[in-house]
């Protein structure tokens, strides 16, 4: 690992931005050298609490200053940040969810030039859960219906969660099918009976829930549920810090948390 890794955080004053700052401050061998927020943020130009760094209003500044940039901004900026990583030659860790196919394509383009880490969930538990779900889906026939249910706080803007989609992809992979071919989105009205082999998604929003995910396997005579509960945001921040340090010195490419945790 490099001597002292210069870290930049996009969305620095958000829920995850603050959890990341706290986690990096507890970590040896790293310095937060830049942080950005949306231009209308009242703290722009002022010191970021706990740091000797002024809050910037552009991502360009953060990419210029840092070795590794961590992106936990709301959906919509990923393609721009991927292009900046490619142009500046900097490593990028993406935590943002609600990504589009165009966002993924932009990350793939950047990954031809620089190391890119992306995960819808940076916790050990969820990444292990993906392997369990893949295995269960492989072993249980299509007479076992698969439903992914998630609950998050009232501020979350995307649905289903990035984690729910990762879990759905793991289940579809276990069944040897692309998720897009078997996915059922939210149900409403006269939906007709459930089609065998499909994977359903339900998103619940309310209160301050950090993140809850259940994958339900339901047959005519029994039901298996694999569940994860996040107890605090520090969990995701600790995983993202680990991922950022793991990325230092890696070649160009697209990486995920399963690489960091050696879960493949
Ligand atoms: N992969 C993982 O493990 C996890 C992923 N997430 C994901 O991370 C993302 C952020 O979550 P969370 O921290 O809760 O959200 P927040 O809204 O609390 O934080 C995002 C911050 O980024 C700011 N922001 C908006 N646009 C920009 C911009 N262009 N440049 C810099 N900053 C900007 C927001 O400002 P403003 O509020 O004014 O818009 C806000 O302060 C979500 O997509 C969420 O799903 C969350 C937890 C774990
Ligand atoms: O927005 C959140 O808060 C979270 N988002 C991620 C997701 O969409 O899966 C991860 C975690 O569940 C919290």
Image (spheres, grey):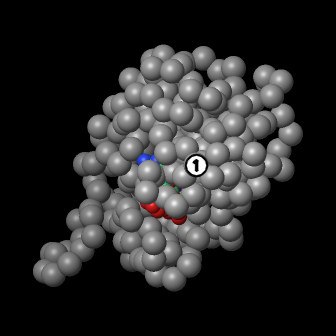
Q: Is residue 125 above or below residue 87?
A: below
Rendered location of residue 118, percent (x, y): 52, 40
State the residue lying farthest toward the front: 45
User: Which residue is located at x 41 percent, y 41 percent?
Assistant: 78
The local secondary structure at tag 1 comes to: loop
Q: Is residue 202 visible?
A: yes
Foreground of the two, 226 or 211 = 211
Q: Is residue 163 visible?
A: no
Dot 1: within a 10 Å radius of its alpha carbon, few (fewer than 14), some, or many (20 or more) residues? few
Where residue 229 sits, quadrant-wise, is bottom right
What quarter of the picture does the N terminus occupy?
top right
Rendered location of residue 127, percent (x, y): 61, 50
* Residue of label 1: 45
* In-image side of 33 versus 111 (left or right): right
User: Which residue is located at x 52 percent, y 61 percent?
Assistant: 42
Q: In this view, does 257 lie above or below 38?
A: above
Foreground of the two, 245 or 122 = 245
What quarter of the picture does the C terminus occupy?
top right
């Amino acid at each position: 690992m490099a001597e002292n890794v210069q870290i930049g955080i996009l969305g620095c004053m958000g829920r995850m931005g603050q959890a990341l700052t706290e986690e990096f401050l507890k970590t040896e061998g790293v310095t937060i050298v830049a942080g950005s927020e949306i231009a209308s943020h009242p703290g722009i130009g002022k010191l970021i609490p706990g740091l000797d760094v002024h809050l910037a209003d552009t991502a360009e500044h953060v990419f210029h200053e840092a070795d590794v940039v961590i992106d936990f901004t709301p959906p919509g900026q990923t393609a721009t940040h991927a292009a900046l990583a490619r142009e500046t030659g900097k490593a990028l860790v993406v935590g943002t969810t609600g990504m589009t196919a165009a966002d993924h394509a932009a990350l793939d383009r950047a990954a031809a030039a620089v190391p890119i880490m992306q995960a819808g969930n940076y916790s050990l538990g969820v990444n292990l859960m993906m392997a369990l779900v893949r295995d269960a889906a492989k072993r249980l026939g299509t007479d076992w219906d698969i439903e992914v249910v998630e609950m998050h706080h009232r501020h979350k803007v995307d649905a289903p969660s990035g984690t729910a989609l990762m879990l759905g992809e793991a289940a579809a992979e276990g069944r040897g099918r692309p998720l897009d071919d078997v996915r059922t989105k939210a149900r409403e009205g006269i939906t007709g009976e459930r089609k065998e082999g499909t994977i359903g998604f339900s998103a619940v929003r309310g209160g301050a829930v950090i993140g809850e995910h259940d994958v339900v396997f339901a047959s005519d005579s029994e039901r298996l549920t694999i569940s994860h509960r996040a107890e605090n945001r520090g969990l995701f921040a600790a995983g993202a810090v680990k991922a950022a340090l793991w990325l230092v010195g890696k070649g160009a490419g697209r990486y995920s948390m399963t690489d960091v945790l050696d879960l493949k």
